[in-house]
Amino acid sequence: MRYVLTALLISALSGCAFVKVNVGSELKGLEERVVSGKGRAKIVVIDISGIISMDHLGLERFGKEPPMIPRLQEQLNAAGADGDVVGLVVRIDSPGGSVTASDILYHAVKTFGKEKGVPVVACIMDKGLSGGYYAALGADEIMAHSTSIVGGVGVISFRFDISEMLETWGVRIGTVQSGPKKDFWSPLRSGTPEENAVMQGIVDRLNQRFLQIIRENRSLSPASLEKVAEGGVFDAAAALDLGLVDGIGYLEDAISRIRKLAGVSEARVILYRRPGALAESIYAGSAPLLRALSNVELGVAEMLTPSFRYQYLP
């Protein structure tokens, strides 16, 4: 892994870049797939899965699907335009990611529920951490599987200082810059106390926004909020006790909850998919399969630029 990261870093610093190539036919529109239920009413299930990002990560860039945010918005637009849609289930399995992307997802889910006037329930699958949980706060209620991991509330920003490694290898870096702060947070030298103070201030303010979103959407006691703000993770039972989730159950239970909130006795459960994509059950995932380089690429990006993340990074 060390050599892979080094090679990618050198490639980035030398001006090399990944090139996005459109392969195959033009992207086709969404199709509605009924996976269970009956009747005229519809309950839509959408996914927030994997690292939350504004753009493609890793090998996903070579697929036909748009990045997470435009893909989700496309599905919400389709659901919003359908008069038979009576509720939305947001299926979440994410460690979080970009601060801005997480905030956009939260806003999109929250806005959909308000403008459409239908109930929204988030269902946390394996994990709903940091930005994944932040996005779930846009729902009216949050449900977690009994084996889910929830929490990771907070902001993190990290940098790699490779100056000693370059010195060991006899590599010298020369820069020409317009001002003394132009190379702010550069991995090519050690950080200064002033830089650390600036970054800490931003992290603290973004963290306060996260906590404010929790206050606006959850009824946590001051003691619970203080515990959650430490950034730890919790199993479903502890998350329920703290007030982070409203219930524990399976995806089917989240769908049943939507039916109850919407006041319908029966409804079709639908997914939106591209022509040819599989959607055989409510557990059919929509995320692309090729995620192998996502974390490596993310690590290299963190080396090169200041970045703030609602993301759980153990």
Image (cartoon, helix red, strand yellow):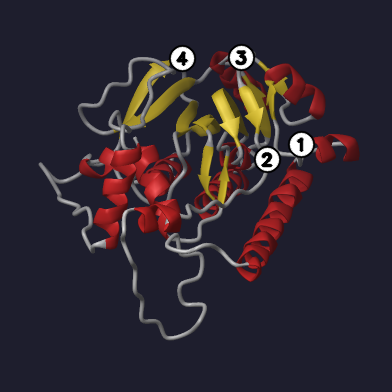
Q: Quadrant of residue 263?
A: top right
Query: Closer to the observer: label 4 or label 3?
Result: 3
**Which of pointers 1 and 4 lies earlier in the amino acid sequence?**
4
Residue 113 in picture, x, y percent from top left: 60, 43
Which residue is denoted by mark 2 in the rendering?
A: 153
Which residue is denoted by mark 3 in the rendering?
A: 147
The one nearer the camera, 242 or 273, is: 242
Question: SS at mark 4?
Answer: loop
How far is mark 4 from mark 3, CA to CA?
Answer: 26 Å
How far is mark 2 from mark 4, CA to CA?
Answer: 36 Å
**Which of pointers 2 and 4 lies earlier in the amino acid sequence?**
4
Query: Closer to the observer: label 1 or label 4?
Result: 1
Which residue is denoted by mark 4 in the rendering?
A: 37
- Residue at 42% from the left image edge and 62% from the top image edge: 188
**Which of pointers 2 and 3 lies earlier in the amino acid sequence?**
3
- Residue at 36% from the left image edge and 81% from the top image edge: 176
The one nearer the camera, 139 or 305, is: 305
Residue 282 in picture, x, y percent from top left: 44, 18
Which residue is denoted by mark 1 in the rendering?
A: 228
Q: Residue furthest left?
A: 24
Question: SS at mark 2?
Answer: loop
Residue 286 in picture, x, y percent from top left: 36, 29
Residue type for callout 2: Val
Left or right, 175 with respect to 238, comes to left
- Residue at 33% from the left image edge and 15% from the top image edge: 280
Residue 270 in picture, x, y percent from top left: 41, 25
Q: Is residue 263 visible?
A: no
